[in-house]
Amino acid sequence: MNLEKLFLSIKGLGTVALWVLVALVAIGILVAVVAYANRSRGFRLFLVASVTLGSSWYAFLVAPFQQVGHEQPSVAEATGEIYPTAPPGQVKRGEEVYRSNGCVYCHTQQVRGTGGDIPRWGQRRTVARDYLYQSPVQLGSQRKGPDLSNVGARRTSEAWHLRHLYAPEWMVEGSTMPPYRYLFEIRKVVGDGSPDALNLTALGLKEQVSPNGRYELVPTEDAKALVDYLLHLKAEVPLFEAPLPKKQEKSDEKQNKKQQSGQQPSKPTVNANQFE
Amino acid sequence: MNSSESSQSSGHPEAEQARGQSPWSAADLDESCQMPVLYLFVSAGFWLVISSIFGLLATLKLHAPGLLADIPWFTYGRVWPVFWNALVYGFAVPGGIGVSLWLLARLTRQCLVLPWMIFMGALFWNVGILIGLLGILSGLTTGHAWLEMPHYTNVILFVCYAFMAIPAVMTFVWRNEEDPYPSIWFLFLALFWFPWAYAGACYLLNFVGLRGVMQAVADWWYIHNLGTIYFGLIGLAVLFYFAAKVAERPLYSRYQVMLILWLLALFGSWGDVPHGAPVPAWLPNLSAVTNLFVILVLLVLANVLHRTVSGHYGSFLKSVPYRFVLFGGVAFFVAGIVDFVTAIKPVSTIVELTEFTQAQSLLRVYGFFAMTLFGALYFIVPRLARMEWPFPRLISVHFWLAALGVVLYVVPLAISGIVQGGLLQQADVEFMQAVEPSLIYMRISTIGDVFFLLGHVVLFLNLGVLYYRYAFADWVATIVNSTQPTEAVEVGA
């Protein structure tokens, strides 16, 4: 007799029976343990503490994991556009630079639905799905500097970011951000010079760095990767659980732009399968 | 029984009862703790100085962003986590273990089991901290708050903790007091709570690698379990010990003390997920509701403490160690009320994601836990080492520096958070416009950091000199004597 077949034929029943068995065993263990615990106060304390910690563990780690731990990227119905996508290697490297230099201690990466966050920093609030491919997730807890969830959409110029990293106070008046000059190097011009070199005249650094034009200020690979990462930070694709707010002129402009550049505006995805 | 010892513990009626049952005198018990606990304290004092140097450096960078900015090892984003990790893992956790060990031995009337094992654990714990902090400085941080140290240090710290905790559990199991003083239950629970929470969080974050936003949830869960429960349990154990000691009468109700334990364990461990966090909405709501229930802890605690100490509050001011404990107790209430208020959504919307959260963490970790620990440390160390503090007047200096430091750090940062958060509520305010008015408060908090550093130097001076006298003075004297070519030595040989 094929047990497997039999089990499959009464699958529902089998599952119920299995759970009853598990429950009976669990109750048995519990009774035995409680019987033992009655003899020792320390052990009883240990036991109840395990249950307490276990319940918070379940509620805060297991239950949310079951809900959002297996989330998949959304696919826009109209365009087939997938969001979010796995970041390219250069962006991943930039994420490492971001992590290693502790940018998270001053910059959050979360746009809330409240507190003036949306008009200031984003198109919509950020949700769990936005962070699928981030590791470590750098939500942050303080805003000594602005939120960066959408910095790639707000500041699109690579040159701006490089200059800002080199000397923040020149790009943003009154900035308290430390300069990251160690992500750059000053070196002698060889041949036509590096294509990445920063425009010293625009920075007002011509006199300091290279009065005779023999030196150039070049971002390191780390700096370039970091900027690529920052430009990649965009949480503006509408999601089923976080559609774009309706009366937003900015988002309309955005869509117009996309249409001009030959793209269809991505509709909010309503795909029941992704939202189990 | 030693007469001087019996006069010391005369104010502790419940400890008195046990006398007949234990073969050990208080002096014996102290001697068993001496070596590991003094080492734990002196190394904790060392990390405290390191921590506040980095804390000061971090806050100075808010005045001058360019300070040391060209050295990657001293960029703000690395200096700040070094400050916090040195405070939590260098000072608070091992300091808490030290106090727990002494209280365990004293209150269970059992000599500490395997002190050498604890000493080795403490020694390599410090090695782990050193590796971890250097890891953060060199850019190997994990990026998870309160768990920044690289993943291999998690293993070191966990194993070392086991080395310290196993003898403690054995001491408890072999206790000479069947129904020990209630503080013991808090300490016993704390012994398990730290490794559970720490191992769980490290495993999920640094070894498994949770996906997406679950990382942040695991991190919040850990921070709350360490900050509220672990520190809360040890701090309250110390508080109950001193409350009865100062008032020279038994605790008002042991049942209510146990109730506090269960309320704290039950409601305290439910994370503090911020309201605006990008997670399913039930998670921050659940966490806020359980945070509201923590007020029950405060109510019962206020009842027990007041009815125990009532009429003897003045006695707290008589001795400086008691003053530290009193300050810690008050800070626990303030921190609890602040947590209660910020669990309410409209309030949390304003203050979350600002400096306010930092003020809140420091109030709990430093204002409550570290201050209570200082009190216990100043009380315990002279008894353990059997010598007076080298500079007794500096204890009072440290108290004022620390107390003013907490106030000058927490209050300005809290104001800064409220100002900034309030301004940011208005959609048309530019970010820089909201930062500017709050910046002055952040800068005032630097005074608090300076006070912390001075206080810690004072503490370490006392601890270091005492430890030198205790551990090395005889040894050094022997070496110095033996290097002198005296005839007496040859004759003796």
Image (spheres, rainbow, N blue to C red):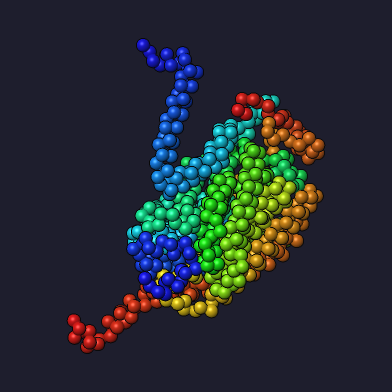
Q: Position of residue A19 (x, y in %)?
A: 47, 25
Left or right of B365 in this view: B154: left
Whether residue B60 appears in this view of the structure is: no
Q: Residue at x 49, y 57 (%)?
A: B183
Quadrant in which the N terminus of chain A is drawn: top left
Left or right of B206 in this view: A266: right
Q: Position of residue B19 (x, y in %)?
A: 39, 64
Q: Residue at x 46, y 78 (%)?
A: B390
Relative to A162, say whether A131 is above or below.
above
The outermost residue toward the bottom is: B487
Relative to B34, say whether A253 is above or below.
above
Of residues B5 and B234, the one drawn nearer to the viewer in this rendering: B5
Instruction: Please count the marks in the image.
Output: 0
Q: Quadrant of residue B164?
A: bottom left
Q: Position of residue A183 (x, y in %)?
A: 57, 56
Quadrant in which the C terminus of chain A is drawn: top right
Whether residue B329 appears in this view of the structure is: yes
Q: Residue at x 32, y 82 (%)?
A: B480
Q: Quadrant of residue B290?
A: top right
Relative to B11, say whether A255 is above or below.
above
Of residues B230 and A173, the one drawn nearer to the viewer in this rendering: B230
Left or right of A18 in this view: B367: right
Q: Position of residue B79 (x, y in %)?
A: 56, 61
Q: Quadrant of residue B16?
A: bottom left
Q: Residue at x 76, y 37 (%)?
A: A245
